[in-house]
Amino acid sequence: MSARRWPIVTLALILVNLVIFAASHRTVDQQDSQLWKVREHILILAATHPSLVLTPKAKEFVTGFQNEFSDDWAGMQNPNSDAADEWDARTRLIEDSAELQEEMDSLGDQYSQLTASSITERYAFIPAHPRPITYITSTFLHVNWWHVIGNMWFLYIFGDNVEDYLGHFKYLVFYLLTGLIAMGTQVLVNLHSPIPTVGASGAIAGVLGAYFVLYPRARVLTWIFELIFVFIWIPAWIWLGLWFVGNFLSGTETALAVHKQNMGGVAFWAHVGGFVSGALLVKLFGERSQRSPYAYQ
């Protein structure tokens, strides 16, 4: 029986994710800020002046927003609502329909230009209009440092043992495939959502599902945050089972919610889809020959 091999794919995935985030997050933040401001103005003008003609891209976004956030849309249609900014206050004084159409045309042009150059628009996963490449590229984008570090910590803790079981190449295919399935699950429950989904957590959920099947009796050091600075060892099947149930219940609550309070949040159904696919597929991928039989922590 050979010794455990270095988890080179897990370490490489961690490095790639960290490098991509470090190299792109400032640009992404700037682009997203500019793009959202234009989107907000398009929504306000479309809500208060429904007769205006929108560009195809702007119309697609507005339609998706109407379907996904109907309560917010109704609030934007209220003529007595507070002005969102100086632009909103200024356009409320415009009465000429031609001038308002010019304003919308300008916003539409800005929107097309910004989306064409936006890293998020090109590589994040958007359920309303998913592109094949984004099923994979979205798993290498993250929102902030806490997001990427948290995901990479989970991958580091659980990924090495799954990689040891599958072998390097099959593990990489497994990781990418479960990430793809995770995004597919997210689109099934959010068909019309225009909100980008990013992060490696769907693929990592696949790794967690595999770990749940392969090493249920391995112990996981867990922080009990109700009791400050208390750590205990619990079986992996309990920890991972609670993690899965929590995501399933949160996803169900989100899907059934009548009033959506914000446009962001956690892609719970991507976690659920990733975990289930990982648990089901790991045995189908098969164990590599000559591996260590133990789970390492």
Image (spheres, rainbow, N blue to C red):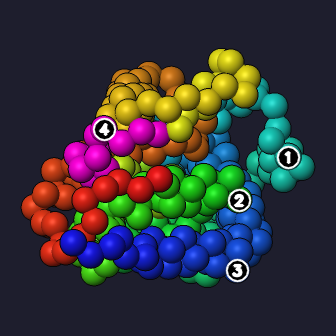
Whole-percent x, y for residue 108 in the image = 61, 68
Q: Is 79 positioned to the left or the right of 241 in the image?
A: right
Q: Quadrant of the N terminus?
A: bottom left
Residue 7 or residue 263, whichever sits in front: 7
The residue where tag 2 is placed is 145
Q: Of the residues tagged 1 and 3, which is closer to the observer? A: 3
From mark 2 to mark 3, how far is it between C-alphas?
A: 12 Å
Q: Is residue 168 above or below residue 252?
A: below
Determine crowd level at label 3: few under 14, some 14-19, many 20+ residues with C-alpha closer than 10 A.
Answer: few
Which region of the structure is painted magenta? 210-220
Decide if residue 189 is in sight here.
Answer: no
Decide if residue 16 is in sight here.
Answer: yes
Residue 237 or residue 46, whichever sits in front: 237
Residue drawn at x 43%, y 48% is 193
The residue where tag 4 is placed is 217
Whole-percent x, y for residue 186 in the image = 34, 49
Residue 96 or residue 188, whichever sits in front: 188
Determine crowd level at label 2: few under 14, some 14-19, many 20+ residues with C-alpha closer than 10 A.
Answer: few
Q: Is residue 251 above or below residue 126?
A: above
Q: Which type of secondary structure does the marked residue at label 1 adopt?
A: loop
Residue 63 drawn in magenta: no
Q: Which type of secondary structure does the marked residue at label 2 adopt?
A: helix
Q: Of the residues tagged 2 and 4, which is closer to the observer? A: 4
